[in-house]
Image (spheres, rainbow, N blue to C red):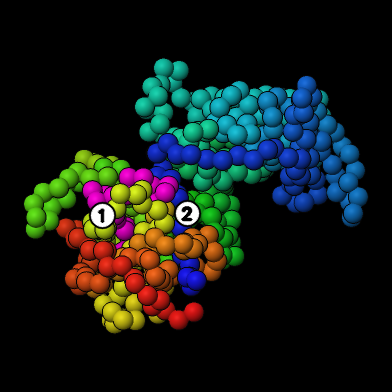
Amino acid sequence: MKRILVVLFVIVPGINAIYADEWGAAREKDYFSENRRFAGHITPAKEKEEPLLEVFEIKDTQRLPLWQCKMGNEVAPVEVYVSNDGRYALTLDEWHKVGYGDHVVAFYCKEGRVKNYSMEEVLHLPRDISVMELRRLIPHSVSSRWWHRNSIKFFDTYAGELYFCIWLDLFDRWVAWNPANGEEVKVNDDMVKMWNHKGQLWALKQIEKGANSLIPYEFLGNQKNPDDRRLFEALLSDDEFHLTHGGLSRIFRTSRGTAGPRFQLISSSARRSLAERVLAIWDGKPTKDPNSSEQLYYYLGKVEVAVKLPQTDKAKEGNLLIYLIPSTIERDNWHSTLPIHRFAADLAENRKVHEDCLYGIEGVTPGKYWIKVVWDKAKPHWNRYERPPKICLPQQGDYESTESPIITVKAGEIVGDIVIDCTREVAREVFPK
């Protein structure tokens, strides 16, 4: 039986790619005001019944009904915000299709729906905007248009008036509405200053609490406060690498000649990528290659590897794993510590993994490494979902690489033109059970 030590790999989309997503059935749910004194309860639509919003006041263990109304959603909203006095509620988006429809933003009170907006109205997009331009501006998935995925939202009071505010991360600007009439208001400099300060305090608190979300970092990155630079420099050492995207690579050259462009699969760290982008902006550097739109790295490096697998008539199955091993670790001891820089792909899910595929690891810490490749071919397969993350140890029936050059990764550079032979079959149990 195969012993496994696991690395968790999740497919994370590129920001402007169209990717798959999944939605479960909408369920009844409570959404609390910031002061936790009020709750908005959502009952999704059922057959011919419209979705229902019920607002309660929370007193000790009691829930006292305040008001209720039908909503304009087809099924249910995705997010709900309740004001600290329980008088107003705001809903965002439609269940299973974010960014579509006429209730992307909607305001409610005890009299019912106050006003609602489409995404185009919220973002003030031109009516004749092309599909390609819209996809460039807004990340898309099969079901949705993610116009506020990394945004900050809250109710707040300015000059005695209550407003609902959203910081739009894609556009780095605030939008606000008066919930009493649902009208958008002009955001002045004092409002921006006040909400930036509130957003900064919130973001720093979330980071201090160890938040997994990138939203606090996205906000601080746009504020460009020099005191926050240390937070982003720390992200350059993040150890969560995932398979993120695929596409055509640049021309790949080896000692055998030119072979490219190839289909390329990339593993990267979302936090390292964010830190690179933010620091590049702060330092006045471009963030994307103008020829390919790929992210440029200045503080970390990239590694590109071609892998030679054994020829077989059957469709390849199992997992392909690539590890960058620090050169200070002996070859026979490569499995002693989970490498930070790693790549993993399910061959059944990624049918384009073959001889002509190129594998990339982005955001690599500068230093010297050698490369270990494992084709986890024999069952039971390495479990990529197991936690805590561990390394896959090749067992009988798997294939592994035995030779690798020492590579030197430098900040801002790509180490490529590497071919690793992974054709040695493991003929016996290597690691004790």
Residue 152 appearing in the image: yes
Q: CA distance from mark 2 to mark 1?
A: 28 Å
Which x, y percent locates residue 308? Answer: 23, 58
Q: Camera-side residue: 183 or 171?
A: 171
Query: Are the residues flagged by discs 2 and 1 in contact, CB closer than 8 Å?
Result: no
Q: Position of residue 140 (x, y in %)?
A: 46, 35
**What crowding class fits label 1: few (fewer than 14 Cα within 10 Å), some (14-19), or many (20 or more)?**
few
Q: Residue at x 22, y 71 (%)?
A: 403
Residue nearest the viewer, comparing 399 with 339: 399
In the picture, the disc for residue 311 is 1
Query: What's the residue type where badge 1 is placed?
Result: Gln
Mark 2 neighbour density, 10 Å: few (under 14) some (14–19) many (20 or more): some
Residue pictured at 73% horizontal, 36% vertical: 89
Q: Is residue 32 left or right of residue 395?
A: right
* Residue placed most toward the observer, 373 or 328: 373
Whether residue 353 is in magenta: the answer is: yes
Measured from the top left, where is residue 68 in percent x and y?
Answer: 83, 31
Closer mark to the observer between disc 2 and disc 1? 1
Could you say where residue 319 lies in the image, as x and y percent from the top left? 40, 58
Label 2, on which residue?
10
Considering only order in the chain, which callout, 1 or 2, is on the residue closer to the N terminus?
Answer: 2
Amino acid type of the residue tagged 2 in the rendering: Val
Q: Residue at coordinates 48% horizontally, 39% vertically from top-left?
A: 20
Which stretch appears magenta? 347-364
Q: Quadrant of residue 326?
A: bottom left
